[in-house]
Amino acid sequence: MRPQTYRQFRGLELIASENLTSLAVMEANGSIFTNKYSEGLPGARYYGGNEVVDELEVLCQKRALEAFHLEGKTWGVNVQPYSGSTANFAAFTALIQPHDRIMGLELAHGGHLTHGAFTPKRKISASSIYFEPLPYQVDPVTGLIDYDALEKNVKLFKPRIIICGASAYPRDWDYARLRALADINGSYLMCVSLSLSSFLSLLLDLLESVLLTLRLATGWTWRTSRASSPPRSRTTRSSTATSSARPRPSSSLSPRCSASRD
């Protein structure tokens, strides 16, 4: 513990998926809740003795809705442990079937591993193993998303999900055009907002206009809200907002936020 504490305080972390969390979050992660097994959802657990866990989880759900100014009648929230990769995979499995087609920004162009990343010799993530991905790219001259090329490929490939959002693309997205591209084949438009989620929650008008174009969104809140990074125990919790009109993803979503609407 001491060498790791020293290493963090003496170095400068420049890894996008890491942050220095607050003492309150670290205390919560190491709390008495570590001792309790709590699969399932509030009021529908596999084990008894979860009444206090249910209270905590319902409170997290309420705060997640409030943070993103969402109505509980329209949006459902699932607060569960684990990582952003699992959050994205839960979103995929909630919406599409194995071997359905997905399109996301290519990894080398700023995309994320979970958006169907693969090489000529290897499928890198579960999303490329269980689904059929075709990446889109940025224009090599402007460095911006090549929406014209994307439109051509959407018409040919006919993906079930089009993914926007990235790990390393320092520009905004043309959500209206992406929505139009998704509508060509009746595809789902999914936004992996990553570090933008907490920032967008402060810009209410922008957040609302973005969410209205999407079927589902996921985000890493720890990058900007100082929640915990991917947990090493099952006690870390997160917020996942899903439309109450559709089944909720069964897997867990950690300091992440995902929202979906009809």
Image (tube, rainbow, N blue to C red):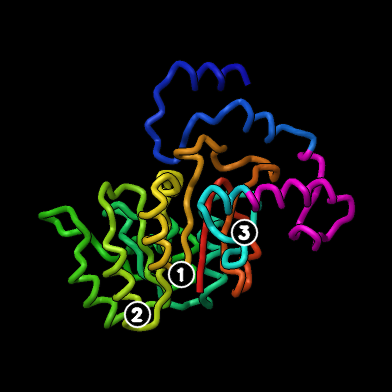
Query: Residue 183: which disc?
Result: 2
Residue projecting furthest to the left: 141
Q: Nearer the viewer, residue 185 or 17?
A: 185
Figure quadrant of residue 90: bottom right
Q: Residues within 10 Å of mark 1 (few under 14, many from 20)?
A: many
Residue at image coords 42%, 77%? 160
Q: CA distance from mark 3 to mark 2?
A: 26 Å
The answer to whether residue 46 is magenta is yes
Q: Nearer the viewer, residue 161 or 244?
A: 244
Q: Pointer 1: what residue?
A: 215
Going from the N terminus, do you reach mark 3 or mark 1 first?
3
Q: CA distance from mark 1 to mark 2?
A: 11 Å
Q: Pointer 3: what residue?
A: 77
Q: Nearer the viewer, residue 244 or 154?
A: 244
Does residue 58 appear left or right of residue 198 in this picture?
Answer: right
Q: Amino acid at mark 3?
A: Val
Q: Amino acid at mark 2?
A: Asp
The answer to whether residue 59 is magenta is yes
Stretch of the chain drawn in magenta = 33-62
Q: Amino acid at mark 1?
A: Arg
Q: CA distance from mark 3 to mark 1?
A: 15 Å
Residue at image coords 27%, 82%? 155
Q: Is 83 rendered above or below residue 152?
A: above
